[in-house]
Image (cartoon, rainbow, N blue to C red):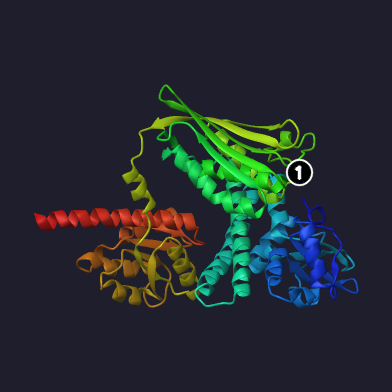
Amino acid sequence: MHTLAHLIDRRAPVAADCACETVLELLIREPSILALAVVDHGMPVGVISRETFLARMEVPGAGDLTARSVMSAPPTVVPESAIAAEVAADLARTAPETLLGGFIAVDEDGAYAGVCTAVALLGAAQSQAQPTTAAAGGLIERITAETREPVLNTLAAIERMRRFRLPDDAMACLETISEASHGVLDLLETAAELHRAQASELRIEAEPRRLQDLMDEVEARWRQRAEVAGLTLLVSYDGDPDCAALADSPRLIQVFDALIGHALANARTGVVEASLKTQPAGGRIAVHGRVRDNGALYEAGYLARLFDDTAPPAPRAALGVALGLALAGHSINAMGGRMSAEPNTGAGATIAFDIDLGAAEAISEEAIHAEAQSGRSAHVLVVDDNATNRMVVEALCEMFDCSTESVADGVEAVEAARAGRFDVILMDIKMPRMDGVAATREIRKLKGPAGRAPIVALTANADPDEAREYMAAGMLCVVEKPIKPERLLEALDMALAAKAESDKAEAGRAAA
């Protein structure tokens, strides 16, 4: 089994009295550095996390501070001889924040040996473990679940702080922390998705989608990031503007995200082109997508192993980029397509994919508008006895343009529901005084709209038998904790659709 000695970054630490300005120059010069160890007389005394440090440096005068002033101390210290999987599982359970910020590995004499983060542990789990074993799956799922929750809590706190009138410098720090947190969430989700893909459990869910709209979404997602990187992003669509296909559009966007992310990471100057070409043929649509950059010189063999998830990431590829490319390859294969990567004449490369999709009927503007409004403009009651959980759910609902009220237990939920002013109720299960199942049964006894409000269970206990109990009590569906934003949005969509159907039926009965 692999030990930390195989994974740690053995770069030289920085001294405790090192100026932050010097540390900043190092991080800018070497973007692959995620964490730095801080030592005093050769012994580790703290850790500097890249994203936290960069956020701190937004404050005027911070460059004059020393590393000791900004480091996280005392650091978590682990022997380099420790088994990597055991360290990951233990830290995910006891101190997930150290997985994000970094921890220090020491030799048998207690002297500094290297620094490590969750990124290295996730990479090892993906590239070294057998993906179909329960141990590998359990490790990845554990790291993902345990780390996602504190990151979501951070994002919820950021959303609340944005409401205050903070100085511009403080707002800049918030945005930096928010961007870093979203990056961690993306990395965790990609790692978990790649594990599912390696185990042949990747789901492809095809729905009608107008392909020009898909490319418009790709452009909107990447335009600003390309500008920040100093690159010109050209996004184009070649085909019938009304062409609609049966496609898993989130997967296709995920593929473009991986290819464009790779291009931006490697093409330091110049233009990045992303295009999609469609050609209808006999009830099917041939789709050719590509991303081309002209700003990088790739080593021999680099492009050949670009989608090989069994090989360690190439030196120029950050782990997030490498995992994204590997997942993109699996996604296109699962859709029955193929991917290719070829060097351009001169600098740069062109990465392309070809898939054959079923044709769908043209989608009307009315349908598109209705879809865009899905899951929005609802008034939601959040029921949870944990204040942090309530804050997280409220922040997610606000992201989906939903207003919220919150209560702390089932008794309060029933009283609040009597008013009949909620479109959806998000109900925790285990609460004092009255649990979520009992509260749901009481709400279903209420007359009128109050008793018909869709109720969604929020719980970490979602095995099939328990889910059936929740449904029998009158709940609509279950969202597992820690909550994934896309799963909550899906549940809100379902609940609002159910409410609309219920209101329509009630109106019909009243008219009769």
- Does the rendering let one see residue 231? yes
- Residue 338, x across and y down, in percent: 59, 30
Asked if residue 432 lies left or right of residue 159, the reply is left
> How many residues crowd mark 1 within 10 Å: few (<14), some (14–19), many (20+)?
some
Number of residue marks: 1
- Residue 178, x across and y down, in percent: 59, 64
Q: Quadrant of residue 142?
A: bottom right
Q: Quadrant of residue 48?
A: bottom right
- Residue picked out by circle 1: 314
Q: Is residue 84 above or below residue 388?
A: above
Q: Residue at x 43, y 64 (%)?
A: 397
- Does the rendering let one see residue 73? no
Q: Nearer the viewer, residue 214 or 191?
A: 214
* Residue type highlighted by circle 1: Ala
Q: Residue at x 69, y 48 (%)?
A: 265
Asked if residue 367 lies left or right of residue 27, the reply is left
Q: Residue at x 54, y 38 (%)?
A: 236
Q: Is residue 330 above or below residue 74?
A: above
- Residue 351, x across and y down, in percent: 64, 35
Asked if residue 453 lies left or right of residue 284, the reply is left
SS for tag 1? Answer: loop
